[in-house]
Image (spheres, rainbow, N blue to C red):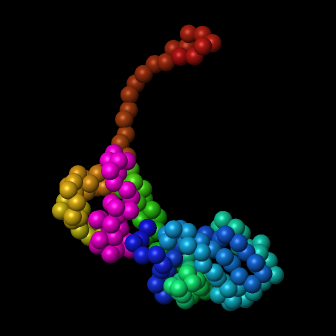
Amino acid sequence: FYNKRLPNIGELVYTRISNVTEYSINVVLPEYSDTEAMIMINEVSRKVSSNFQKKYKVGSSFVCRVVNVDKNKNFIDLTKRQVSSEESDEYLRIYKSNKKIIKLVEDYIKKDDSRSLNSMMEFTFWAKDTNNFLKFLVDSNFDRNLFDIDDCEKFMSFLYDKINNKQKVVSSAITLKYYGNEGI
């Protein structure tokens, strides 16, 4: 998602459980190329219950806050306790919209084999140093000259059309006739 390799202390991150032990939960951070992180049991909940391993299953996901980052060893410690449900809901909304924008960028560059996702992101969203791609686009009013790329107007039109794509209703009156066992 982002141009940086590791999150900053205090940041919220989306996590997916990769392993549960009796003392910790090991997770991966999809936003940061599935970088591994750890949550100690006392940082998951205020009270430790006996069904801890039943409640937190491999593959499930939630939002955590970064409490420590060791950039030399790539260790990241997280807490779930310090994240309110409102913060979690808001962050999940942003995460999903960022994921949608990245998918749209991937769809756009499929037409142009000379670009990779990283190079396109480098000249677009990463260059603007934003963590909320959709809000950034809306705040800029989908400015056709927002990014320093050759086909910015075409790119912004593509994003605008896909994001603001309203459902189109088409109605027609047709009659289907059945003529035998082989179908219509």
Residue at the image point whose x is 32% and y is 50% from the top: 114
174 up-or-down from 112: above or below? above
Residue at the image point whose x is 21% and y is 64% from the top: 148
Q: Is residue 106 visible?
A: yes
Count up the numbered dots: 0
47 up-or-down from 153: above or below? below
- Point out residue 164 in the picture as x, y percentages from the top left corner: 32, 54
Query: What segment is highlighted magenta in the picture?
Result: 109-135
Describe residue 170's horizontal placement relative to residue 23 as left or right.
left
- Point out residue 73 in the picture as x, y percentages from the top left corner: 57, 84
Q: Is residue 135 visible?
A: no
**Residue 80 is a magenta residue:** no
Determine the image quadrant of residue 81. bottom right
Determine the image quadrant of residue 133. bottom left
Residue at the image point whose x is 43% and y is 67% from the top: 1
- Point out residue 11 in the picture as x, y percentages from the top left corner: 47, 83
Describe residue 133's horizontal placement relative to residue 52 as left or right.
left
**Residue 122 is a magenta residue:** yes
Residue projecting furthest to the right: 50
- Point out residue 155 in the picture as x, y percentages from the top left corner: 26, 54
